[in-house]
Amino acid sequence: MYKSFSFLLLFAPFFFLKSYAQSKNNHKERPNIVLILSDDMGFSDLGCYGSEISTPNLDDLAMSGLRYTQFYNMDHCCPSRAALMTGLYPQQTGLGWMTAKNFHLPGYTDELNDNCVTIAQVLQKAGYATLMAGKWHLCRNTHAGKTEHDWPLQRGFEKFYGILDGAGNYYDPPTLCRGNKLITPQNDPGYHTDQYYFTNAITDNAIQFIKDRSKKKPFFAYVAYTAAHWPMQAPEEAIEKYKGKFNAGWDDLRRERLKREKQLGVIDSTVDLSPLDTKPWAEEQDKGPMERRMETYAAMITIMDKGIGRIVSELKKEGIYKNTVIIFLQDNGGNAEGTGYGNQEDGKITFVAKDTSKLKRLGKDDIQYAVVPAITHDGDISIMGKKVMAGPENTYLAYLKPWATLSNTPFRKFKNFTYEGGIATPLIIHWPDGVKAEKGALRKQVGHEIDIMPTIVQLAHANYPEEYNGNKITPVSGVSLVPTFSNQNLEPRAIYWEHEGNKAMRMGKWKIVSGGIMHGDYGSWKTFTALPWQLYDMEKDRSEMKDLSAEYPEIVKKMAAMWEKWAHQTNVYPMPWKEEKAAERSYYMSTPWEYPGF
């Protein structure tokens, strides 16, 4: 049955999209579009998805719009953003891994290729003003004086303020850029504040871009927050509001979140809580510092939420709120990385730099390039360690695996993995003029961020190109979600994943998953062990507790063959790493690939 849909699904967004003239006279009919992406947050981290973290503005958008309960991303920063911006699987864009290395293979370069277009490029051709504030992370070159061909302005955006790289100090962000010019918070001619904080700067610039845009056009604004990616940094007054909020520990809080998720309907009542996958809270020896990490993480999310509320207020002030589509989602699941853990044996405070005597304070005009800086522009030397209290700008810490387990309630695993904990994301769509549904409506249709491009193309009455700047453009891989606005089903299809040897496929209620064990230091792998496929029934077992592969081997065989065919068609192959097969199935359970530092 699924083969019969393959041709139709490839071109479905275009068979069903009405072609509109792109004249300046029809802009009032077309909605403005605000696409908001958060960073390294789990499925249950919003109040409207079960969290105890305060997110009233996103909750309001959700309760007067739509919440999707089975929506997916690509499980890691670069691949996820590539899929979101283009409507293609990451390997189709050249970003099957990260921007850190060019493997000189079609699916694994270090930037977007010329056979894809971004949402901004499509909408710019359709007469939209195109604005971006936040994290780009789709190009290898982030240094001044080199090629800028894959920076935001060269990929369809008229305005850009943000970082080119993937993360950094919230008080001194690396590769900070306005337009095509690298800047520092201290020398930015377009933005000044005595209390600089990157999340607020993203909001401020997004609002200013909306204010300054041409009022003769509809606009597309891409607001890509770095919250709540490490480091855990936030103003003290924001952290203080969460004092004691998490002292029950991650295990009790997971159970409470699952209860709320079921009450809200974002998780089915039959779903069980996945194994804790970390030590219980009672055994934690450093409760104070660990609570502080989660308090800071929560503060970072609430600050972002307040910024989203300010954007909404600007839309209302201008009288354009009702005809603005607001879309919110996350780039991957909660992050279990051990960044900033420090000495694993004694947990003492350590420095990012091995020799602090050689550190020099950066000058006002010296560009910060370090994602993990040894020293900031203010002269603060960065410290880390499990006993360090998160928050200040001289700390560099992640919130660690136990809290990531809470973020991903009730799912297994984390960012980078293709279990639900790595790839499940909230999706909120809000459009008063266009979405007529009961308040707080849920949508259980299965979707993926490759669907955002064709959805926006349809909403904007735009045309996805066959060619762009003389280059043949790969047909979009996703489908429009517009039918789901009125709760219609999407055509049956399969959705696929591959990242760092982690593989998955979802088709109807069935999902197959295969983990990958990479061998060697991060990013310098030569080989990886491909583990046996597991099979899960997503209707009965969303938390992936019962592997059914032994009971339904023919389903596994069929889906695995489909995955292999897809992988060959979308540049997953050839891969940069040599694949080795696991010798025994027990190898999977006894030696799962994990992040260091726990």
Image (spheres, grey):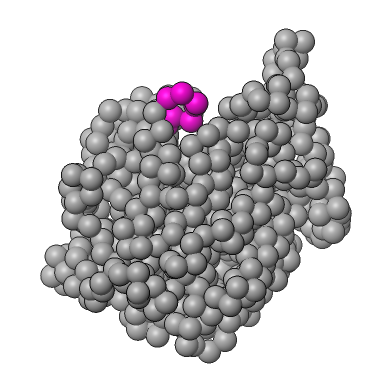
Left or right of residue 478: residue 49: right
Which of these two is toward me, 404 or 152?
Answer: 152
Q: Is residue 267 above or below residue 569?
A: below
User: Which percent across, then down, holds residue 219?
Assistant: 46, 64
Name the dominant secondary structure of the magenta segment. loop
Asked if one can make out residue 235 in the rendered structure from this viewpoint, the answer is yes
The residue positioned 25% from the left and 69% from the top of the image is 13
- Whether the magenta-drawn stretch holds residue 152 is answered as no
Q: In this view, does 442 lie above or below 523?
A: below
Left or right of residue 85: residue 342: right
The residue positioned 34% from the left and 53% from the top of the image is 121
The residue positioned 69% from the left and 19% from the top of the image is 353
Which quadrant of the view contains residue 216?
bottom left
User: Which percent across, then down, holds residue 217?
Assistant: 43, 66
Which of these two is toward me, 90 or 29?
Answer: 29
Start-end of magenta stretch: 140-146
